[in-house]
Amino acid sequence: MNAKFISLDGIDGAGKTTQLNVIKQWFEKQNLPVQFTREPGGTPLGEKLRDILLNPTSQINLRTETLLMFAARQQHLDDIILPTLNQNISIVSDRFTDATFAYQGGGRGLPESDIAQLENWVQGSLRPDLTILLDVPLEIAIQRIENSREKDRFERENSTFFNQVRTAYLNRAAANPKRYAIIDSSHDKESTKAQIEHALNQLFHVK
């Protein structure tokens, strides 16, 4: 079975941490090799850039923020993603370039064409085989963030920002429905789990 590149995305508070465990369990059940990683991060350099990007005290302008995201992504591709896929091992990334289109594009207003240029330069033709997009109403996402952890630099943004981020995600999914599986993660865990397992079964042709 050919290795697949899967990304898991969605607004903060959508439940990515919980659903990453669901994906891990699915791969274990199918006895398929897989590696998990994250963005920004995944490499020593990427993790240092992650600390800068998520630190609430960091003062970063929009272009610098976007370039740092793609700098981390380039290293991530070269050191982790491409070598793993070349070994015929699937890889699951907690966020990928859709997050840049959603956060720096939709949320902060950077033109999509600017992000697309960087995407093509860094990634070439590489795109995830499947993007699992966790979608949840904003009020639920905010409640989850408030109840779970100290907010990072992005989580401190206002509701208008997150509405724009969510809209950007959904617009991208609507424009390319074959690559995206929109998962309603606002209901109980078993319902969300079933949706994700269905998407993975379809990707790997598991009956």
Image: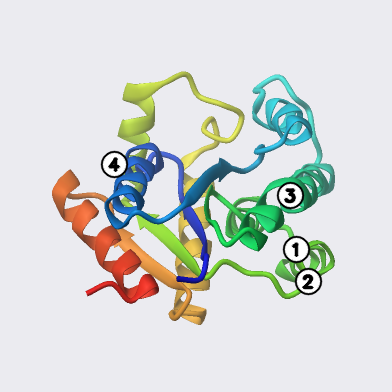
**Rendered residue at 72%/75% (across/down):** 125
- The front one of 70 and 93 is 93
Amino acid type for the residue under numbered disc 3:
Arg
Mark 3 lies on residue: 73
Instruction: Relative to 183, say whether 94 is above or below.
Output: above
Mark 1 to mark 4 CA distance (whole Å): 29 Å
Mark 1 touches mark 4? (CB < 8 Å): no
Mark 3 touches mark 2? (CB < 8 Å): no
Amino acid type for the residue under numbered disc 4:
Ile
**Rendered residue at 24%/62% (across/down):** 195
Mark 1 to mark 2 CA distance (whole Å): 13 Å
Q: Earlier in the sequence, mark 3 or mark 4?
A: 3
Mark 1 lies on residue: 115
**Rendered residue at 34%/65% (across/down):** 200
Q: Which marked residue is nearer to the observer: mark 1 or mark 4?
A: 1
Amino acid type for the residue under numbered disc 1:
Ile
Q: Secondary structure at mark 2?
A: loop
Mark 1 to mark 3 CA distance (whole Å): 13 Å
Mark 3 to mark 2 CA distance (whole Å): 12 Å
Mark 4 lies on residue: 140
Mark 2 lies on residue: 124
In percent of width and height, residue 139 lies at 31, 42
Q: Earlier in the sequence, mark 3 or mark 2?
A: 3
In percent of width and height, residue 187 lies at 17, 50
Instruction: Relative to 181, say whether 96 is above or below.
Output: above
Instruction: Please rate how many residues cluster around mark 1, counting C-alpha atoms within 10 Å: few if below 14, some from 14 to 19, many from 20.
Output: many
Q: Secondary structure at mark 1?
A: helix
Instruction: Please rate how many residues cluster around mark 4, counting C-alpha atoms within 10 Å: few if below 14, some from 14 to 19, many from 20.
Output: some
